[in-house]
Image (cartoon, helix red, strand yellow):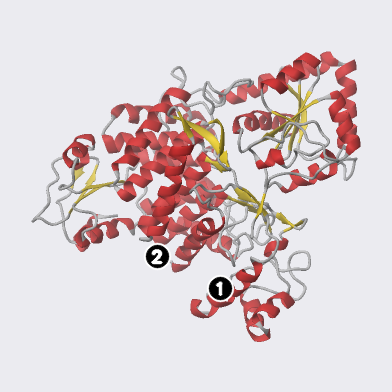
Amino acid sequence: MTTVLTGGTAAAGHTNQLADALSPYLLQHAHNPVDWQPWGAEALARARSEDKPIFLSIGYAACHWCHVMAHESFEDAAIAAVLNRYFVCIKVDREERPDIDELYMTAVQILTGSGGWPLSVFLTPDLKPFFGGTYFPPTARHGQPGFLDILNRIAYLWMQQRDALAASAEQITQSVRTHALGTAGGQALPGRQLPDAAARELAASFDTHHGGFGGAPKFPPFNALELLLRNYARTRSVATLAQVTTTLDHMAAGGLHDQLGGGFHRYSTDERWLVPHFEKMLYDNAQLGAIYLAAWQLTGRPRYREVATGTLDYVLREMTAPAGGFYSSQDADSEGHEGLYYCWTTAEIEAVLGAEDGRLFGQIYGVTPDGNFEGRNILTGPHADALPAAQLDPLRARLLAVRAQRVPPARDEKVLVSWNALMISTLARAARGLDEPRYLAAAEKAADFILAQLRSDGELLRASRDGRTGGSAFLDDYALLANALLDLFETTQAVRWLKESEELARRMLKNFGDEKAGGLFLTSGAHTELLARTKPGFDGQEPSANAAAARVLWRLGRLLDRAEYAREAERILQAFAPGMQQMPGGFLSMLAVLDDFYNPGPEIAIIGAPEAAAARALWREVHARYLPGSVLVGVDPAQAGAAELAKKIPLLAERPLLDNQPTAYVCRNRACQKPVTAPEALRALLP
């Protein structure tokens, strides 16, 4: 049974203008007594015509503190009355509109030095921010001002001291616009030593006891781990590998990892990865699945394979729509309590497993009578290898079956292109790395769904839910999907994925490019009514959109031998060179692209019918390895269109079968080794 996010708490039958929204987050507030409106021309025109300030509230469906503020303030009739009288109130789902979120998060960070969600911002009718914060309690407590007091004070200042607010708004707006432009683009690429320097910088903040970087709260460090995996693959530094494995081991053993159902929660509130913030996000699990897969390929440790498959199986089981797309998130709360769905008492476990097996399970997963979280137990698995899987897995399965009968966390069934693209990439890589056809089937079904349902006149749309689509796509949608389709091409060698990837890359350059300064904007011309167009270079919950764009352009340039794509990738790296040099820790995914630029992986072509046993044996040698920055391509010379494909992909040109057997060609920088037909001979040519 699954709870689906659809609407909020009813208030005497009141319905506001969010009732027809696509976003489950907006629908949660459709019955608030606040007269919410979605962001759009109508709401903005109303603010101007009524000469009222805008109260902009930004959040997302799985956000715990968004729920708290909604219950305390937005369902309160007295607070709603003040909001409705003195403000035009606008709700935004940050997952649908990352452009709005980025601009006003920047404003709040300028104002307060920090940010987060719910994001609460007050704007002039011309969209300039003058005051903001995150969560506000309804009345003052613990040193925080009360939301009702803030509303009354701002309403008074708007009527009595408008000029002062306008001056403050102008100053903040100029800072936001300056930040949006970023640092001035460089004229040259950063030096080849910068990725290694960033790895050394990470080492300085590494937590040797618990893994991860820095202190609590700890978020899964996807981009740091990817950079370190690349560094280790090239340098074989034992110290670098230790940072990766220590972090992966502790995350997998901690409460961050769902020990029964697989997958990971959003972040850990402590330095030990014990107590998570219990929401589950698609993008986290896509990226962590990829990291554990790569770590297994690099180290051969069975535990990493188990975690990777458990994570992907969770997504296929609980986060996949019948039509093929992947849902966005699961809430942290159930039955009004955070984490209740995932936690256990000793008595509950023994009631399911019996006294003897229950005690054994409790010893393995750290269960105590007093619990480790609000009197209950978050399961942790540092001793999960103490029993053979044949003995432990049935116990876990029995508890998982009972857990499935509980009231589950609500699920946001919105399908977002960029987040789906991350999962498609991971599934495509896992399908080949683990030789698992069901992962490939899921990846292709999701890609087909997006290309069929989330395009209009060739342009991507941002989101869909229940057959409805909405919103123009952003740079991250185009860049990440183009990469995902290229991953599908490398897994299947189906030319349709390559064609779709290249088409998206062309549209990406056209819609988001900046010919003057280099780099790509987050928004296209379809996104209007904004203070500024930002160029995302920093990593956030996803790899930076410009890093993803540079990666796919560099990959296409190498695969197709298209110098114009490679030049565009280089222009992006040049545009963000100053930022990478000044703050490498904020640009780790872009540094990984830079590492590819200076240290490209091998170019591997396998000629022969892919279903032939000999060809599959060659591909298994390639797919079992972690080969960052590689180019993988194959063709059956007997298939229709093989000659045309060889013209499109120079790596396939003049690559005959050797002794009429499937044949592998391994090249670096266009210098190729002698072709081989035996798996052991290919193994000797691979890093």
Instruction: Say whether residue 598 is visible.
Output: yes
x and y percentages locating residue 651 in the rendered image: 21, 41
Q: Nearer the viewer, residue 671 or 200?
A: 671
Near mark 2 (Cα within 10 A), the count class, few <14, some 14-19 or many ≥20, is some
The image quadrant of residue 483 is: top left
x and y percentages locating residue 516 in the rendered image: 45, 17
Which residue is identified by label 2?
A: 300
Q: Nearer the viewer, residue 386 or 405?
A: 405
Of helix, strand and loop, which one carries label 1? loop
The residue at the point 83 percent across, 36 percent down is 33
Q: Nearer the viewer, residue 621 or 609?
A: 609
x and y percentages locating residue 306 in the rendered image: 48, 66
Question: What type is the residue that disc 1 sits on?
Answer: Ala
Side of 496 where 134 appears, left or right: right
Of helix, strand and loop, which one carries label 2? loop
Quadrant where the N terminus is found in the figure: bottom right
Side of 266 where 656 appears, left or right: left
The residue at the point 53 percent across, 45 percent down is 201
Using the image, tell me which numbered label, if any, was put on residue 598: none
Instruction: State how far apart marks 2 and 1 are (Cα).
Output: 18 Å
Which residue is identified by label 1?
A: 384
Which of the two labelled residues, at mark 2 and mark 1, occupies the earlier sequence position? 2
Question: What type is the residue that disc 2 sits on?
Answer: Gly
The image quadrant of residue 249 is: bottom right
